[in-house]
Image (cartoon, rainbow, N blue to C red):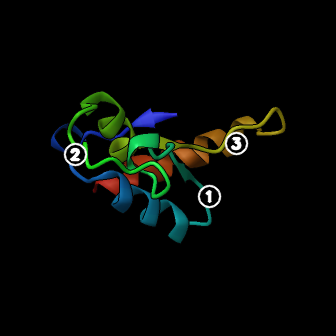
Amino acid sequence: GVLVDQSQFGIDRDMLRKNLADRGIETRTFFIPIHLQPPYFSGHRNRYPVAERLASEGLYLPSSAALTERDIRSVVRAIIDARE
């Protein structure tokens, strides 16, 4: 998992996800904090800023024992290219 800080990376997490998806690379976002999930929503937005930041910037990249070095290089190249 990685955090995508738009101010440092140049694009936000969702744009990076789209760019990777366009290249056939699947990703997942981090969890949604429990206090923001519908059954538990308590109206306390911004009460847990760390959890909310992780949820808004977090991204899981492909991971598997079966990934080859070539696969990893392909993902890295796609991430670099997404910034350009």
Q: Residues within 10 Å of mark 1 (few under 14, many from 20)?
A: some
Residue wearing tag 2: 6
- Marks 1 and 3 in Cβ contact (< 8 Å): no
Q: Amino acid at mark 1?
A: Glu
User: Foreground mark, 1 or 3?
Assistant: 1
First reached walking from the N terminus: tag 2 or tag 1? 2
Point 30% across, 28% down: residue: 50
Point 82% across, 32% down: residue: 65
Q: Is residue 5 left or right of residue 73?
A: left
3D distance between C-alphas at marks 2 and 1: 20 Å
3D distance between C-alphas at marks 1 and 3: 16 Å
Disc 3 secondary structure class:
helix
Residue 10 location (% of width, % of height): 21, 49
- Most foreground residue, 10 or 59: 59
Residue wearing tag 1: 26
Point 50% across, 60% down: residue: 20
3D distance between C-alphas at marks 2 and 3: 27 Å
